[in-house]
Image: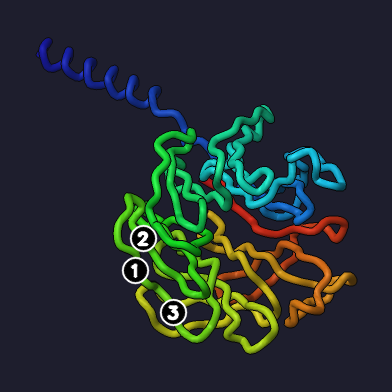
Amino acid sequence: MRLIRSMAVLFAASALLVGCSEDPPAPPAPVVVSFDDGWGQVFVMNADGTGLRQVTPTVAEDMSDGMYANYTALSPDGTQLVYTRAGRTLEAVDLASGESRTLHEGGYQPAFSPDGSMIAFTSGGSISVMNADGSDVRVVAQEDSAFGSSFSPDGSRILFDIAGYILEVPASGGESTVILRDQFWNADAVYSPDGSTLVFSSNRGGNNGSEIYSMPVGGGEITQLTTTYAVHPEFSPDGSRIFYTRATTQSGELVTDIGLSNRAELASMNLDGSDQKRLTPRSITGQNPSIGGGR
């Protein structure tokens, strides 16, 4: 009886220790959106458009200071921002401290892998990949006119564009595969977080500009999501919203003909194109969104 009673006490103490060691799960980090204004400055804000702040210095009017910034990429946890400075240098900024450092000379259009360990970028018309700290730079798609890149949800593949068609290459390098090629100009392709859908911009709407479309991964019916000029789609981390750049007149009216537009703004919408909302204030322009946090 004494042995049984001792074992019962031991089990109770073990259960108490296990229960005390289990901390409640940390709440997800807030979703953050970064973008450039097309005039050399980079900004971040919350996913609902609040909390807007400028991250990079204001550039000289003649851009002689070499600080012109564009093409942002947020790390998946939303703490680090990488952007292109002076058209060819990849800079990283810690959003909490403001500390910055140069990652790589000779690249632009960065994109983080889903786990934050790698960054893909355009370099000399080809697609390259490096570690997030700027080390181990290697070319994965040797093409003369490749541009833009985005990772698959598992980080194993990279989408990119060549002359109006969309290709994919293994993140480790290898042979490229055509994903979409037809008589239209297609670009800006991104995977949904669950890997089921491809969203991209295309001029298949017949206007003097592009709209945003979706199609099932592996091919299938292409669905139009916007009827006015829109490019650069990006998914929210949970896959429930699409953030994108759209064109407007100076007074804020949406346009189909890019020749009539005066400015760009950021907006978001549901996956079916409904509930389109402007995010950036009318006082600044906004383009090329990147999304981080929410994990």
Q: Report the Cα–Cα distance between label 3 and label 1.
A: 11 Å
At label 2, which amino acid type do we have? Val
Residue 57 position, x and y percent, is 78, 38
* x and y percentages locating residue 271 in the rendered image: 55, 71
Task: Read off the residue under disc 1.
Answer: 177
Residue under numbered circle 2? 169
Compared to 141, does 165 lie above or below? below
The answer for how far apart the CA atoms under marks 2 and 1 are is 6 Å
Identity of the residue drawn at 66% across and 72% down = 230
Quarter of the N terminus within the rendering: top left
Q: Is residue 264 above or below residue 206?
A: above
Given contact means CB atoms under 8 Å apart, are the residues at marks 2 and 1 in contact?
yes
69 left or right of 182 in image: right
Q: Identify which amino acid the numbered label 3 is placed on.
A: Arg
Q: Residue at point 60% right, 36% down?
A: 92
Measuring 12% from the left and 10% from the top, which residue is drawn there? 2
Mark on residue 41? Answer: none
Mark 2–mark 3 Cα distance, whole angstroms, equals: 15 Å
Helix, strand or loop for disc 1: strand
Label of residue 181 in the image: 3
